[in-house]
Image (cartoon, rainbow, N blue to C red):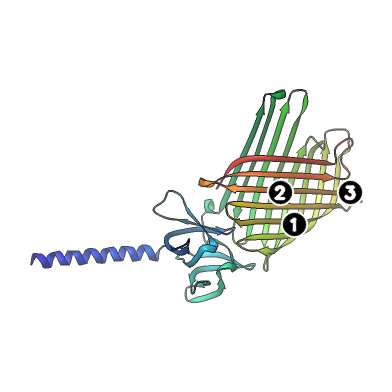
Amino acid sequence: MKHTSINKKWYLACIVLIVIFQTSFAQSDSLVFDIGYKTFVLGEIKKMERGVLDIDVSYGDENFKIKWSEIKEIYTHTQFVVSIKGEIYRGRLASISDQQIKIFDKDSVLITCTRDDIVYLNPFKKGFSDRLGAMVEAGFNMAKAQNLRQFSLRSSISYKTDKWTADASYNIIRSSQDNVESVKRTDGLLNYRRILPKNWYLIGTIATLSNTEQLIDLRANSQLGIGRFIISSNKAYWGLKAGTNNNLERFTNETTSRNTWEAYLGTEVNFYNTGDLNLSFLYMGYSGLTDKGRYRADINFDAKYDLPLDFFVRMGITFNYDNQPAENASETDYILRTGIGWEW
């Protein structure tokens, strides 16, 4: 009798454990990936973008990150906003073979695609804080020679939904040394992008700039345009955009303030499937509509290396050109900066 009672308790405990495991599994996302051997992970997928998937697992203090290209199978309890070749879908994901994944909602299959067709994943019905992203980066140089002091700050914040994205940035550079004029540069950006089908998007931007090299007290650009991603994948993207720009300028010398209209053409390239290294390049060219013969260009290149705990180091160069600058001002201005930062 005692032996029978023990067996019943053992069977009951096993049943309880199985129920708990099945309930946990049913409410979690699961991955099978290959890092030389197949590994199974259970948790909550936070996002997948730029070729890296974030999953929150119960046995770690921080999210587990895995390259999207290493994932062999994926099964989600969460409903996701999924970007596939410029189209947006809302549904859950389930692998049907080593490379094929179906996006489905209840009993309806929305689309079947390959793993590499998926550009990004974002959980649907996310909270406000989950849609936010932020970054801050600082650099400081000091030398005894001529009492040199240099400080730089780069910061940004973004908000993303399945239909639109908005981001803002603010960057400053201050440099001073004995017997030399102080160098000051400040730029800011407010950007809104409305996503359209087939990798098209509408864009509205307000950008500001001031720098001592070109005697610019304030340059305020208000832009409206349309763009398209020529390449959009989990390895890289390349986009083109064009539109009109209102250029309002005020200078630090006697040069008369300007208020002109320009046409602009821009391109942006970003490579992020290079291990922990991200490379980005941005070019914006402006041609005068009301100020004939004037041409301006803004160029930016960044190399960013990711560190543990969401820290990073970055080196970048920014170049500005204007063939009709303020009186006695330079046609060009450039900065080379390095810094360490943190992103969320």
State the image coordinates of residue 91 (x, y, percent, origin top left).
Answer: 52, 68
Q: Which of marks 2 and 3 is nearer the N terminus?
A: 3
Work out whether 139 lies above or below 306.
above
Residue type at the position of mark 1: Thr
Question: 260 and 42: which one is in front?
Answer: 42
Residue 195's image quarter? bottom right
Residue type at the position of mark 2: Phe
Seen at 65% across and 56% down, the residue is 271
State the image coordinates of residue 140 (x, y, percent, origin top left).
Answer: 64, 33
Q: Return the residue at label 1.
A: 267
Residue 5's image quarter? bottom left
Q: Return the residue at label 3.
A: 294
Residue 214's image quarter? top right
Q: Return the residue at label 2.
A: 301
Q: Single out the mark in the foreground, 1 or 2.
A: 2
Q: What separation in Å lies between label 1 and label 2 (alpha carbons)?
A: 12 Å
